[in-house]
Amino acid sequence: MINTTFRFTARTLITGLVLGATAALVQAETYPTRPVTMVIPFPAGGVTDTLGRATALQLGEVLGTNVVVTNKQGGAGTIGMAQIAKSRPDGYTVAVVPAAPLVNQPNLRRLPYDADSFDYICQLFSSPLVLATKPDSPFKTLNEVVEYARENPGALSYGSPGPGTLPHLAMEQLLDVLDLQLRHVPFTGDGPGVTALMGGHVDLYMATGTVVSDKELPAVAAFADSRIERLPELATATEQGYALNADLWGGLIAPKGLADEHKARLAEACHTVAGSDAYRVQLKSLGTDVAYRDAEAFQAYVSKVSAANAKLIDKLGLAQ
């Protein structure tokens, strides 16, 4: 009787373990089993929101579930980023974010997160920056700007969407490499900045090619490997003798601590989205290019840029 009971108990235990393992395997294979929330740390209607919604649509199709976008704006993206950082890492909260809240804001001020507070899924997009000029500007090339600025230190002004933004830091890196002195005039975004440029209140403005083409602004250089499709006549900085690139970029992240199988599934889906013709066409219509990096390369790139920007922010005295 004792032996029979033992055999029954052992058999029951083994059966339970097998069923439990099978259930866990099925759960891993069928993730996600419900809608995924995608946080966008900027307001609806902006560039990041538009890119995020395009990504959510394609990602949902690949994952086989709805990806529901929620905007959590404020603090130059830091409010939404803080929410993402403290969310449960269960695979059901992801975010499409631009670079600035990752590589700039934590170096500008103390925040409840930093670049190491997230799991990186993949980089998805990149939008080259362009140096625009006011409508009646005498400058037609980047070399003309450089020559004038060298002969007249501090005479030219340039605008940016704000201190510590990627366009601001990109311009400062350009000035540092070329040993130029220009006056920085910060604005609260591209809207007022571009308006000021069009009114002749600043001489130059660093913006994306989309902004420049939409406003039909003159420009002297594109900081990209090749010419921008929307601005085919605009020569790159490299073509003009200056091997300098600058862009607005970003990708898909999640709260730190994802289960390996969830991270792998999201990374696989992210790769599929980045390689799809539909996604490329969508981004192209927004003046942005697909720029894919896998999880490891994306995280390494964030770390590299964050360290470089930290030094530049310190040099410029921007840290609060």
Image: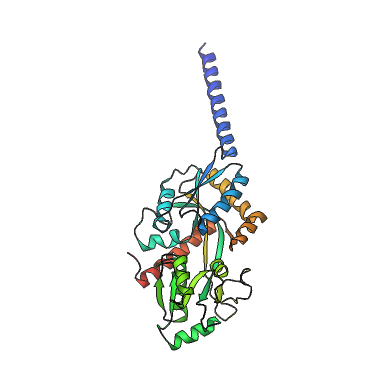
User: Residue, x 53% and y 24% (percent of image)?
Assistant: 13
Q: Residue furthest bottom?
A: 151
Q: Residue furthest top?
A: 1
Who is closer to the viewer here, 280 or 108?
280
State whether residue 15 is above or below residue 64: above
Total numbered badges shown on the rendered structure: 0
State whether residue 15 is above or below residue 282: above
Q: Residue furthest left?
A: 320
Spot occupied by residue 270 in the image (x, y as percentages of width and height): 58, 51
Spot occupied by residue 44 in the image (x, y as percentages of width and height): 49, 53
Task: Please indicate, yes or no, whether residue 276 appears anywhere in the rendered image.
Answer: no
Who is closer to the viewer here, 275 or 71?
71
User: Residue, x 62% and y 46% (percent of image)?
Assistant: 61
Q: Residue furthest right?
A: 277
Who is closer to the viewer here, 140 or 99?
140
Q: Which quadrant holds the C terminus?
A: bottom left
Spot occupied by residue 25 in the image (x, y as percentages of width and height): 58, 35
- Give the colour scheme of this rendering: rainbow
User: Residue, x 60% and y 79% (percent of image)?
Assistant: 239
Q: Is residue 79 left or right of residue 48?
A: left
Spot occupied by residue 162 in the image (x, y as percentages of width and height): 41, 67
State whether residue 257 is above or below residue 221: above
Q: Quadrant of residue 17?
A: top right
Q: Quadrant of residue 27?
A: top right
State whether residue 289 is above or below residue 17: below
Task: Please indicate, yes or no, whether residue 129 appears anywhere in the rendered image.
Answer: yes
